Image: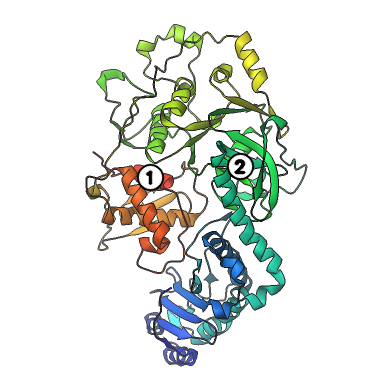
Amino acid sequence: MVHQTSRDPDDLRRMLRRIDGRGYKAYKDIEGAYGFPDFTLFIDHVQGDPFASPSRLRVEVAHKNAGFPREAYGNKLRKVGLADYLLRRFDSGCRMAGRRAGSGKSGLIGIDSPGQEILERTAVIVDDGGLEARFHVGLPARGRRILAQEADHILLGLVPRIVAASLFYASLEEDTAALLKHVETNEDADYLRGAITRQGLVAFIADNAVLPRRSGVDDRPLDKGRVVRFRSPESLRVGFTLPNAGTIAGMGIPAGVSLIVGGGYHGKSTLLNAIERGIYNHIPGDGREFTVTDPGAIKIRAEDGRRVERVDISPFISNLPFGEDTCAFSTENASGSTSQAANIVEAIEAGASLILTDEDTAATNFMIRDHRMQELISKDKEPITPFVDKIRHLRSDRGVSTILVMGGSGDYFDVADRVIAMESFTAADVTAEARAIAAKYASERQEEGGSAFGSAGPRVPMKESLDPSKGRRDVKISGRGLKTILFGRHTIDLSRVEGLVHPSQVNAIGQALYYARSKYMDGQRTLAEILHLVLADIERDGLDIIDRRAMGDYAAFRGIELAAALNRLPTLRVK
């Protein structure tokens, strides 16, 4: 928390009266700190125009004033859980306040609205000193003339009421059980994620979990029609004792190669999507509170048209026509197979330990080459080594497991450690049946993967290839929703990077690229080393380390997604 000398709220009221009716830029006079009886209000940045991004404000509340029981923030996980709970209350208060009349964004009050995941954020921070909430206000105007009376109503009326209703235990005491459950669920999920790793598992889905979502654009749990709660097959059931929730049981997926099979619309992709989201903790009532996954999991797909910069895709693709080098492969327009190969190698470089793939979004010629095609097109004329022939080496040589949704090729039975069938959203362990079928009906295809996974050497990003400037501004970086970063004059397309769940992660990644460029890209450090250093700084000092401004729209991300953004920067150069 940043402390500075504060003025009295009456000073704010007098300043507003003085600038009433003046041009909008006169609002700059009210920037500063104001000491209310139980909290301090900071007006950090005033927008230059009623149509510009709203002004940035924050409040600080000392723990002695907030009054929350120590058990609610006794460790880092509980602090994050409490911050998330308070953010949701503050967000609700902003929504109830509504939007008042005026030009542009006049009267708008808002905060970084969370989704189903519990993420460490800069919107609300709980530390040893107290609470801090960062939000935005559209300072009101008619045309470009200040409406001081409306501003007074917002800053000295609505904001204190929202703060009182959301950041003080006295206002939330009747909801203590819900608050503690929120905090404890976050703690339990993180504990469970560590426990499955220690037990040699890469994913766990608790019995009675609700995995289906309402729609592709609504991530809340399905609550209409027939909702099938998850139930583990007996052969895969494992149990854990959590610090708060006690004993739970569910399906544990061991490290190795796992297939998810079944007919169309029976829940294969739903299960994989839940596993994909298991890298995050979820709020109580989400249905996936105790669906957790190896934190190094990443979903890989084909990504036709993406740029690739000097990636060693030779484990999968070699002997291209005209002697093109695949040990340092570059293209401005990758095919489905080359993009999927590059995505896997880049993921390994960034520290991935579990690959998730759905055949629906994969390149067919990358996934399998059956016996008949091998007979027609001999290996010396086919540059692609299919994934089926590298998946075991990926595990043995690189320690990377795979969970694969596969409904169209039984050739993967030969390389799978286990096979899980989904029927009407119910899971069954059919490993024995799949092995019997594989033994009875030999595929006759020739294995083409060689005796090892192959090389995939480190890359060193060049600082000068990251130019954040635009026009007269040395640094111009902004996120646009969940799928785009504007980095200087260039656009980073994240539309097919599936591990991101909130726009604030995109905002933070854009700024973290600049932080990495400024501090660690020296022409010597590898990409993996840079990722490690950036994440270590954030772990030690929080997300504020990436930006000197007190921004309220950053959320935690992984090195895997930071690397994905860097790899999709159109100007990236590596050596």
Would you call the spot at circle 2 few (<14 residues within 10 Å), some (14-19), or many (20 or more)? many
Which residue has dot 1 on it? 563
Q: Residue at x 40, y 36 (%)?
A: 348
Q: Can you give x and y, in whole percent of width and height, for residue 72 in the image?
A: 60, 67
* Residue 236 placement: quadrant: top right
Q: Relative to 355, is 80 above or below?
A: below
Q: Nearer the viewer, residue 77 or 223?
A: 77
Which mark, residue 274? Answer: 2
Q: Residue at x 29, y 60 (%)?
A: 475
Q: Nearer the viewer, residue 541 or 278?
A: 541
Q: Residue at x 28, y 58 (%)?
A: 470
Mark 2 vs 1, N-terminal side? 2
State the SS at label 1: helix
Inspect this view and state whether residue 423 appears: no
How is the model colour-coded?
A: rainbow
Would you call the spot at circle 1 few (<14 residues within 10 Å), some (14-19), or many (20 or more)? many
